[in-house]
Image (spheres, rainbow, N blue to C red):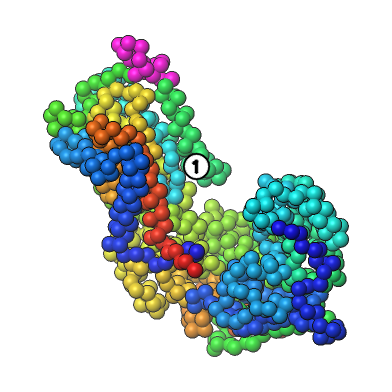
Amino acid sequence: MRVEPKPAPSFAVTLLYPVAAIALTFAITALLVLAAGASPFSVFHLVWKGAAGSQFALLETLTRATPLIFTGLAVAVAFRAKLWNIGAEAQLYMGAVVTVVLGTGALPLPAFLLIPIIVIVAMAAGGVLLLGPAVLKTRFGVDEVVTTLLLNFIVLLFVSMLLEGPLKDPMGLGWPQSPKVIADAQLPRIVQGKRLHYGFVMALVSALVVWVIMKKTVLGYEMRAVGHNQQAASFAGVPVNSVLMKTALLSGGLAALAGFSEVSGLKGNLTLDLSPGYGYTGIVVAMLAMLNPIGVVASAIFVAGIFVGADAMSRSAGVPSYIADVMVATALLTMVVAILFTRYRLRWK
Amino acid sequence: MPQRPHPAASPPPSPQGGGEGAAPPVLRLSGVTKRFGPLLANDAISFELARGEVVALLGENGAGKTTLMNILFGHYVADEGAVEVFGKPLPPGDPRAALEAGIGMVHQHFTLAENMTVLENIALGTQGFLNWKLDRIGARERIEKLSWEFGLAVDPAARVASLSVGERQRVEILKALYRDARILILDEPTAVLTPAETDALFATLKLLVGQGLSIIFISHKLNEVMSVSDRVLVLRSGRLAGERVTAGTSRSELAALMVGQEVVSPPVPPPEPGQLQLVLNAVSTARRGAGVTLDRISLSLRGGEITGLAGVSGNGQAALAALISGVEAPASGEIIVRGNLAKNWSPRAALSAGIGRIPEDRHAVGTIGDMSVTENVIAERYRTSRFSRRGFLDWRAARKFAEEIIADYDVKCPSPEARIRLLSGGNMQKLILGRALDSAPSVILANQPTRGLDVGAVGYVHGKLLEARARGAAILLISEDLEEILALSDRIIVMSKGRLSAASPRGERTVAQLGALMAGHDMEAA
């Protein structure tokens, strides 16, 4: 068996790869569902109903997709320049910390001033957090996979410390949680009485902005050049290190927006379970989208739908909702294989 | 797996004929041809290797030596031709068959597991799958016997990570001997050794040959080839350029064979030297990795003149090219561009100083394979007002520029949107040429500009360089192809061990004299 390079497939054919990967994912998880003693068809039907079968389900899926769009964009931007940011989780929490610090009354400003200020500072905090690993990488060749991954744990412990100390809600009955942000620091709900908030709109706009950056701007061009061939980019005069710094700021900033939007739009305060691994799931989202910013929106909604649908399904079918984690993880693996097949073919001999 | 008898104790698995002269060759290659796309890496190569003989395979980088040995060892499958070992055909593309036929290879880059011991590395893969428990005592005895016999001193219990480079190489040789290799291929074995280690290696090779092994010694170092081999095969651009008995040849003759003698001069009008465009003044570069560094180099390039830089590869040409193209900054010394001292030397500084660069490796350095032709042609000047405004790229202007280059430089490509990876080497080079020359640079660095190109593309590149010379550009042509240097250069400089010879005007030095300089003779006297 040999692996041989092949010419690039057309755009239309490229779209088939994620579809095939997802189909394969369903086939593989169907076996697990069978093993759990349920019918795959009824289970997948229940997942679909739970994710998109009603207005409530659909809004819940979009609410869950919101942070995933942000972290998916963060990962897509960084991976495009081959800056392996595994630390979106930590950057998300930095954004949330800034939101709580500035949004609980420290800045008594009207919403139209307060929210932009929080957004800018949160993005800066997330970006600076990724800047450290980026500097270590360009200066000393330290592997950013290790540094960004480990920063996730450091930041989570740091947040834990804050929630037990300076940011602890005095009215919180001793729970490690922050006070609620003030009304002027909250993102309004899109539909009154439902959980979907304007963070979702921000996420869509962010995806569009990232798409424009990648396609139309000098910075996007530089990021792609550095990602595809750093040596050639450097030879042609692309300032590789400075491009990687800008990539880090943008990627960290996008991940921080996930934290801002969760606190300001949905939860209202900061707890240690603000993110059930949105930063890590963002990697799956970005890979499924093949790092395309518009594709990130679709894949985030898909992944969110799996999680939301699996919760509903497990209540009625008795199959553990862990099946959602398995599906998402399997989708990542099948997608990585599918991406391999966009560039190589197997030859049996 | 039962242990096979020691190689020295048993004859090779072939009928050994009667007398000395009647012995069949241990290895016979006939008409081996290998193509990589349009590149002919090996062109109908045939040779024989006799028992107890050291054959040196000599050639420049890219001449096809390593490809040929990879075919022999089963890593590549030849497009045409056949390999016979001890009179039996060797099945192609099967390293295991090559091992079993008695071929052992010591790669340029070692293939050892660093976290395991010498013994484990040597015995690795020699045992059956089910027979998992290593016969350590037997293996150890055998390794010690081999190392004593052939002067390959190494401690079988030592971890490979703790060994010096020379010791690691001994482990590689022991590995081959442990598997009863009768033919040993050494790929650039001295590239990483100190002189003392090299001497020890040569002593070992003599012992091995004394036991009837045959050795193929791949190198581009002339003095080693002269001292260790019985016979020399010279490869040049994939073809067997010559075969000499070592005792009856000289370094200069081999150097000339390596780089080619036939000089076909295109019409080159007499030079009209202009003013000094680029001056290097006692420039040294910092040591980085194992490459040769520049040692107080001084060089002046005048407009309207092509300066040819000849030399055996690996003598500092890469460092000089990296310096002039801005990739490397000088550690000491000065770069003076048209009378101005250059500061903060970088690729961008070199570009804005008006240096057009044609890099040696068009795949890894010259182009970004997965980006389009358009994206590649603007890579050196996407920040100019022609292609970007306020941080946004003007793709329409970029595409128009790509179309211009495609038309002006006769590039054959499906569209400006095609990924540049899909272009042939010649068309890729034309695009790089277009990108570098379109802004009419006053200095041109052309590093191996025609390597691997077909005849038509070579002529095209030469024509463009001569055009640039006619309009007054100063050109530094770095090439391993002496033919090319002789045909185009107004003056020739030879590089050896990081230093430059004095420049000689066109026609002053003979090929033999240049060959001697390249071989490292009389750098000061010449």
Chain name for mark 1: A
Q: Vertically, is A104 above or below B285?
A: above
Q: Is A25 or B47 nearer to us in this picture? A: A25
Whether residue A202 is visible here, answered yes or no, is: no
Q: Quadrant of the N terminus of chain B?
A: bottom right
In magenta, the rendered stretch is: A161-177
Whether residue B2 is visible here, answered yes or no, is: yes
Q: Is residue B58 shown left or right of residue A128?
A: right
Q: Residue, x 53% and y 67% (percent of image)? A: B361
Number of marks in picture = 1
Q: Vertically, is B389 above or below B158?
A: below
Callout 1 environment at 10 Å: few (<14), some (14 to 19), or many (20+)?
A: many
Q: Amino acid at mark 1?
A: Glu
Q: Position of residue B103 (x, y in %)?
A: 70, 69
* Image-quadrant location for residue B320: bottom right
Q: Say whether residue A174 is magenta.
A: yes
Q: Residue, x 68% and y 78% (percent of image)? A: B88
Q: Position of residue A314 (x, y in %)?
A: 28, 33
Q: Is A165 or A64 nearer to us in this picture? A: A64
Q: Position of residue A293 (x, y in %)?
A: 30, 49
Disc 1 secondary structure class: helix
Q: Position of residue B379 (x, y in %)?
A: 41, 61
Q: Is B333 or A118 nearer to us in this picture? A: A118
Q: Residue, x 70% and y 53% (percent of image)? A: B121
Q: For mark 1, what is the residue? A: A144
* Image-quadrant location for residue B342: bottom right
Q: Residue, x 49% and y 84% (percent of image)? A: B456
Magenta stretch: dominant secondary structure: loop
Q: Is residue B187 shown left or right of residue A265?
A: right
Q: Say whether residue A309 is magenta.
A: no
Q: Is A62 or A317 nearer to us in this picture? A: A317
